[in-house]
Image (tube, rainbow, N blue to C red):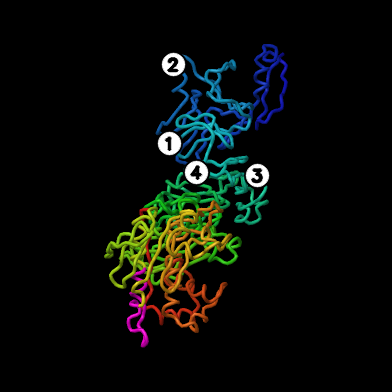
Amino acid sequence: MKKFIMIASALTLPVILTTAMLSSGLAKASVAQALAQANRLPIPAGSNLPKGMKLASPSGNHLLVVGNDGNMMVVTRNGTGYVWGLDQVIDFTKVRPERVELRADGSLGAYNAQGAALWIAPARRDPSARLNVTDDGVLQLVTPNEILWASRGAVGLLKLPFKAGTLLQKGMKLASPSGNHLLVVGNDGNMMVTDKGGKSYVWGTDQVIRNFGQAGVDRVELRADGSLGSYNDKGVAIWKAPVARLDPQATLNLTNEGVLQLVTATDILWASSGPVGPLMKEATRLPLTAGFVLKKGMKYPSPSGNFNLLLASDGNLIVTTKGGSGIWSMDTVIPNFNQARPDRVEIKPDGSFASYNDKGAAVWSPALTRRDPAAKLNLTDDGDLQLVAGNGEILWAHNGILLPRIKVFTKQVALKPCTEAGWDRCVELADPKIRIMSTAGTSSSAVQAVANIYTTMLDLLLPTVSVPNPKSKFDGFKVYITNNEPWSVQSKLPVVGTMWPNQTGPMSGNALQGGASGNFLWISEQLIAKVKTRPDGGAPDPLYRTFDQVVHEMAHSIDGQLVDDRVVNQFTGNETPVESFPGRVQNWFAVPAGPIPPTEEALLKKIFRSRAAFSIEGYRP
């Protein structure tokens, strides 16, 4: 009589081995591989795939079947459409499997009745491996973070974004592109977003599933129809991401800001936080139009390359020179900038322009003259950040300059040659008769610009009862231009050499590089469209200037010729009225642009007919 021994196992029914099997050694293999019977996908390591098994993919579009001949197959829903099978890798005319097993070490194989392997999936072994069928009919051996083997398609480490038809396994941990955030599925089935260290929690499905601990979440799936959900072990949905529509082309992605998104090529269908709707594309160049956003960390140059627009990693919008000198930044106009946490700058389809945080709330929106759906954000060659309408109208500018700038380097102005003792070059304006003298190191481009600026400023002077033709007061006026020559050279120049005799330190000619009186002024090209350096080797002044000194010194001369001291004394600021007045004239002519107190603006309106702005475009130093 044969003796039977019952071996306990994880099978629903016990495995019964005879003493003959034990003595043959076959029992050793059978005991070692006593496996649980697979009853649903994904199939864990340590499972037997019995003949007659039939398990559906998440959507039910495909089935994993083991036929009576031992052939493990992937077929379509109705079982008639063959997709893949073991008969593609095993010659079934010579041998047929008796059983298919996903063993405890994570190896997937087909075996004959004697336990000899007929085929082993070519993959590294991992006890955490599971066997799954995707919604597009691919049989995969996967760990939480890797596809070890697939009946077709790519294998290797998983990475975001996920395509529709993806199982998000417990233990999964994948990083956003920057690595600053992680998408994690915990052992309790909670899909979470954390910081890169995994310690700081950002979002999780435990926020949207009531009584999460009792809900019985078993797995998270991005199904073939594009739906994202959490399911129990019966496949019943516990939560689904609320979307306006399903799209099989949807992918699941994690942004660098830690926002989990279900997206298509054109839309954000769902997000763990922030707005949904049309997907913003990253702009590769300026101008910025509706439907595009600036990429953080990328420099967007002006046409000439002399200025850059940058959206910093903290969301600050910054305008700089090519050399990095600051022109403007958004943190100067957003109160409590660090608490506001701006994330992106966007032009909406209606033409509105604003900075938004990662929740989609506007944290800063400048006042526009009007909205235009065709508006574009652009950076000019003068370093002006502007929102410009389709017809060219400036709707907003970072510096408030809504006037077209006069191109003073290229605009023609009549200049007659002249001579002046001690100077290399001399030209004269016709009306008023102003002489402009310059050194050999001064560019003709700078002389042209100065002539245009002074012609404009003096043409804008308003007549008064006592001075009906104010610009005539400047007949015979003289302008001296140098270009960073050392004081040892400048001190020998007529007039200039007498302006700051024997001065040292901040009041020396080396430091000041200019000055003015009622009859003449001195300016330096070193202060035109650049960051100032000093001929004495002193430290550079980090402030970028355009025509600041050009306008400032002429304002001093206008004061000396035309403006009553009682008027000048009403100009207040951080300096004396004598210096505050030319500072406000600089603001009037936008070099630099800046707010002017109402009382002082009213006074300037009695001196100048209108405002003007000057462009550095076309400068040839």
Residue 524: x and y, percent?
44, 60
Mark-to-mark CA distance, 1 and 3:
42 Å
Residue 34: x and y, percent?
66, 25
Residue type at tag 2 = Thr
Please give the label number shown on residue 197: 3
Q: Residue at x 50, y 38 (%)?
A: 56
For residue 146, what is the image quadrant? top right
Mark-to-mark CA distance, 2 and 3:
54 Å
Residue type at tag 3 = Gly
Identify whether 403 is placed above or below 77. Answer: below
Of badges 3 and 4, the one in the foreground is 3
Of badges 1 and 3, the one in the foreground is 3
Q: Residue at x 58, y 62 (%)?
A: 337
| Direction from residue 537 to residue 550 in the image, left or right | left
Q: Residue furthest bottom?
A: 465
N-terminal label among 2 and 3? 2
Q: Is residue 268 shown to the viewer in this render? A: no
Mark-to-mark CA distance, 3 and 4:
20 Å
Please give the label number shown on residue 161: 4
- Residue under label 2: 93
Secondary structure found at label 4: loop
Please give the label number shown on residue 76: 1
Residue type at tag 4 = Pro
Secondary structure found at label 1: strand
Of badges 2 and 3, the one in the foreground is 3
Bounds of the magenta span? 454-472
Number of residues whose C-alpha sits closer than 10 Å to that of mark 2, classed few (under 14), some (14–19) or many (20 or more): few
Secondary structure found at label 3: loop
Q: Residue at x 33, y 84 (%)?
A: 468
Residue 571: x and y, percent?
51, 78
Residue 131: x and y, percent?
55, 33
